[in-house]
Image: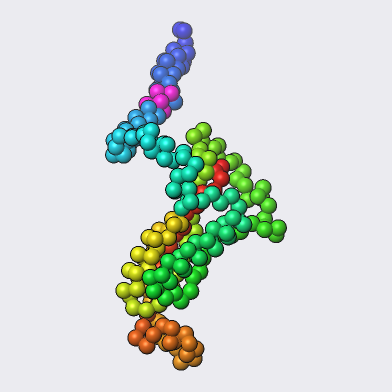
Amino acid sequence: MRNPGERLLLGLLLAAVPALVVGLVILPSTRRLEALRQRLEAAHQVAADAGPFVPVSGEERAFLEAPDAPWRSRIPWVPDDGARLVQVDRVVNELAAALSARGVRVGGMKAQLDPVQADFSQPERATREAFPRRAAADAPEHRMYGWVLEVEILGPTRELFKALAAVAAVNALLEPAGLRWSAAQAQAGEAPRKRQARGPNQAHRQVLLLRNYYLKPGG
């Protein structure tokens, strides 16, 4: 090491190695640890805001697992599209009977459903995710799904409250999900029967949106 160049090179190496260790190892590890600490603090904050977890009691579990529980007739198991159409027909008939019993006049009903699967539908493997998400170990046997039924209520606005009271009397689980209210002046070419059904003083159109729930095989 008598050569000054060699001593200078050795000094540079001795100074560079610690700097490289700090820059490439220690500082990235410190940043990752700080990010992990912030994530843990955020998770603890979310858990604190959510409140304590209350497990299902024995009485609640017995009610949920009972094969003859009342909720089973209100939230039926619908495994396929055919059963779903049967459920739609059931809900429409029950709701129509309840509205008629309370004297509520209906202008029409329209169901909003997800696309049904048929012979010409795209194969499932073509729409499957490239990297499917792993199902959780505690995935439920059935999942809750829903569809929307639009019901046009004829008459003045107060008829809506009569309709909501009738909805509560239906056995199927129906949840008011929205209201579409719009001006509906009679057109010149409107059929007389339709104009008479609306009434001479009704200058609006009111549609009640109801969501019906059912169980579908999970996965």
The magenta segment is 25-31
The quarter of the picture where residue 34 lies is top left
In the rendered image, which quarter contains the C terminus?
top right
Is 29 included in the stretch rendered in magenta?
yes
The verdict on residue 165 being magenta is no
Q: Position of residue 102 (x, y in %)?
A: 38, 70
Residue 213 vertical position relative to residue 98 in the rendered view, above or below:
above
Of residues 142 and 43, the one nearer the viewer is 142
In the figure, residue 104 lies in which quadrant? bottom left
Residue at screen point 49% across, 70% down: 109
At x 64% / y 57%, what residue is drawn? Answer: 117
Q: Exactly how many numbered labels are in the figure? A: 0
Q: Is residue 132 left or right of residue 122?
A: left
Q: Residue furthest top?
A: 2
Q: Residue furthest bottom?
A: 188
Examine the rendering and report whether any part of residue 84 can be seen. Answer: yes
Q: Horizontal and vertical percent for residue 91?
A: 49, 61
Q: Is residue 128 above or below residue 201?
A: above
Give the residue drawn at x 57%, y 57%.
84
Front residue of 23 and 113:
113
Side (left or right) of 114 relative to 71: right
Q: Is residue 172 above or below residue 31?
A: below
Identified at 46% across, 76% down, the residue is 107
Residue 43 in percent (x, y) is at 35, 35
